[in-house]
Image: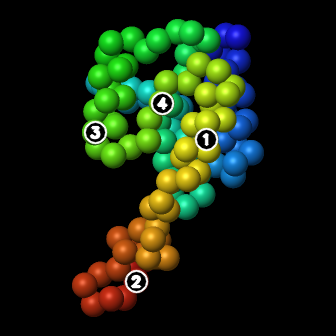
Amino acid sequence: MRESELEEKFRALVRKAGGKAYKFVSPGNAGVPDRIAVLPGGRIGFAELKRPGEKARKLQGLRLEELRRLGCCVAVVDSMEGAEAFVEQVRRLEPANREGRLFEELVNRNPSGRRRL
């Protein structure tokens, strides 16, 4: 299976889980993972997609390790089984929105507690 085929199937799998799989491009930061998977509840994971049996390049591995040390869910995915396991791992993460309030609500409040426009 080509990497592009796996990427297409990965995106469909994330969509089926109710999420989005954004292409991750970060100018000036080579080696970032291919996709950011965002699932309901603010659950986020970073996936480097490869052909079956292919490994991440050295710089890609360093970027994945940086994200892992920051507490992110990361994986090198080289098969549909790996993609399914990754999506399940992200799905099981603690919700990012534990207090039931949206981050946007917090950002859009001024010190008096009233909403900004």
Tell me: 97 left or right of 16: left
Residue type, label 2: Arg
Q: Is residue 28 above or below residue 68?
A: above
Q: Nearer the viewer, mark 3 or mark 2?
A: 3
Q: Which residue is mark 2?
A: 115
Q: Which residue is mark 3?
A: 69
Q: Is residue 24 above or below residue 95?
A: above
Q: Position of residue 98 (x, y in %)?
A: 45, 71
Residue at mark 3 to residue at mark 4: CA–CA distance: 13 Å
Query: Helix, strand or loop at disc 4?
Result: strand
Task: Look at the image and name its color scheme.
Answer: rainbow
Residue at mark 2 to residue at mark 1: CA–CA distance: 36 Å
Residue type, label 4: Ala
Please tell me which residue is depicted at 43% across the width and 15% down the height of the picture: 56
Specify which label sits upstream in the sequence, 1 or 4.
4
Q: Position of residue 67 (x, y in %)?
A: 33, 37
Tell me: 56 left or right of 8: left
Mark 1–mark 3 contact, CB under 8 Å? no
Query: Helix, strand or loop at disc 1?
Result: helix
Residue 87's disc number: 1
Specify which label sits upstream in the sequence, 3 or 2.
3
Q: Position of residue 82 (x, y in %)?
A: 61, 28
Please tell me which residue is depicted at 61% across the width and 12% down the height of the picture: 52
Mark 3–mark 2 contact, CB under 8 Å? no
- Residue situated in front as seen by the camera: 87 or 115: 87
Residue 75's disc number: 4
Please tell me which residue is depicted at 56% across the width and 24% down the height of the picture: 77
Residue at mark 1 to residue at mark 3: CA–CA distance: 20 Å
Residue type, label 1: Val
Specify which label sits upstream in the sequence, 3 or 4.
3
